[in-house]
Amino acid sequence: MSSDASPISAKPPVTLREVAAAAGVSVATASKALNGQGRMTAETRERIRETAQRLGFRPNSLAQSLLRKRSFTVGLLTNDTYGRFSLPLMAGVSDALVDNGVSVFLCNVEDDTRLGQLHVEAMLDKRVDGIIATGKRIDRHLPVDLSNLRVPVVYAFTQPDPGAVGLVSDDAGGARLAVEHFCRLGRRRIAHVSGPASFAVVHARAQAYRDVLEENGLPVGEPLLGAWSEAWGHDAVAKLFGKAGREGWPDAVFCGNDQIARGVIDALRERGIRVPDDVGVIGFDNWEIVAEATRPPLTSVDMNLSTLGREAGLALLSLVGGQPAAPGIRKLPCRLVVRQSCGRPPGG
């Protein structure tokens, strides 16, 4: 079977010479107009820019990089394989950089030191303007040495090098939001179910939980620690509600993440305990695919990862531009996303 159709081929890119000819100016004038340089009338500069846009002219990014001594690219390193934390953070980074003409490319180093070093060397070969390092927990450093690089590095949601700029969410502040919300709702027996003791955030949230209860004159229970899983949330309910007599049962459960909270809610339903009528439940992370699919939808603490990413991007831009930045860890506030799992205040 034959066809008379001509083969498809890519069109050659529009050249600066073609733009200059269409605008009726020299190549040098066209170049200066498109680079914001040279002396010419505003009308001429605008005519050249409109011509370039109409013809679909795209400047040579490599040539511009050599001219300005910048690549206008930033590397984002992460070991968050599932992207649970790095993807919303990357969205914030991109939001901060796109208006400045800077592109971001993501490299997953997993937990492999050799792979991480290969990615860093590739980024340096591509002459990235800077690197943002992020991970799946704030108390662990990425498995790669980022100290003494020839480009600035900003850490976000991972442990920074000494003297570097780091941004993390305020976990203790987020826990306060959750427990204080329960107090405003009139809950008086508030339990806390969280993740493994090896995580620093577990202790930060647990201490905030104790502080708020003490400040409100409420009984302080010992936090139950286990895995970051629905199964652990399910098992924790057996420990909390296995005693005879409702008078000793919690009327609220603050959970260390949304998966635990979902397991808690499922286990309560199996026992005929109503959420939020009998027991209110609040999670942490505001992982929308979990929180919104839970029945009832889950109130949760949002770590504002997109905002954190945006602030990390702006901090890196500042460093790339030669502006100093104060070293150390900066904590950004969380917010409470209220849904149906914690109920309404008395009379509300």
Image: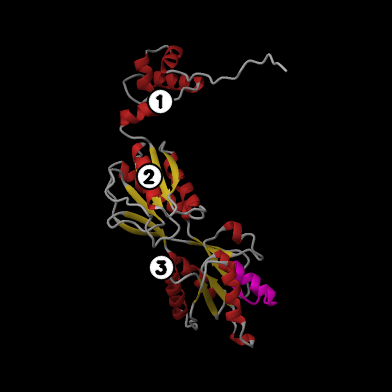
Question: Would you identify the image quadrant in which residue 197 lies?
Answer: bottom left
Q: Which amino acid does the dot numbered 1 rest on?
A: Asn
Instruction: Please provide percent x and percent y for residue 308.
Output: 43, 53
Q: Which amino acid does the dot numbered 3 rest on?
A: Ala
Q: What's the residue at 64%, 73% (across, down)? A: 267
Q: Secondary structure at mark 2?
A: helix
Q: Is residue 69 visible?
A: yes
According to the image, label 2 marks what residue? 118
Q: What's the residue at 61%, 67% (across, down)? A: 262
* Dot 3 alpha-carbon crowd within 10 angstroms: few under 14, some 14 to 19, many 20 or more: some
Instruction: Please provide percent x and percent y for residue 103.
Output: 43, 38
The answer to which of 93 and 149 lies nearer the viewer is: 149
| Mark whose residue sits in front, 2 or 1 | 2
Q: Which residues are magenta?
A: 262-280
According to the image, label 1 marks what residue? 60
According to the image, label 3 marks what residue? 200
Answer whether residue 278 is magenta in the image.
yes
